[in-house]
Image (cartoon, helix red, strand yellow):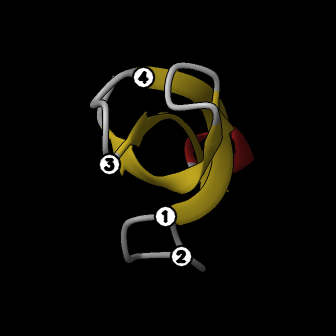
Amino acid sequence: MASDVRIKLLLECTECKRRNYTSHKNRRNTTAKLELSKYCPWDKKHTPHREVKI
């Protein structure tokens, strides 16, 4: 099934450890943990956000 390939995930700020964003990724194409630079409203700056399990 095609719906089993894409998974839902949470992005957690590496500095304040709050879970600010949700995203999707293709499990087959992206096996490593996702890391994006996103805006953290508590730190009031752009910080790296890493994938965590839901």
Q: Determine whether 15 is above or below 20 in the image.
A: below
Residue at 32%, 48% in the rendered image: 14
Q: Is residue 52 left or right of residue 21?
A: left
Mark 2, Cα crowd under 10 Å, few <14 / some 14-19 / many 20+, is few
Mark 3, Cα crowd under 10 Å, few <14 / some 14-19 / many 20+, is some
Q: Point out the frontmost of discs 2 and 4.
A: 4
Q: Point out the frontmost of discs 1 and 3.
A: 3
Mark 4, Cα crowd under 10 Å, few <14 / some 14-19 / many 20+, is some
| Residue 14, disc | 3
* Cα separation between marks 3 and 4: 10 Å
Residue at 50%, 31% in the rendered image: 43
Q: Point out the frontmost of discs 1 and 2.
A: 1
Residue that carries the numbered disc 1 in the rendered image: 34
Q: Are marks 1 and 2 in contact (CB under 8 Å)?
A: yes
- The answer to whether residue 1 is seen in the rendering is no
Across and down, in percent, residue 36 comes to 60, 62
Residue at 42%, 22% in the rendered image: 19
* Cα separation between marks 1 and 3: 12 Å
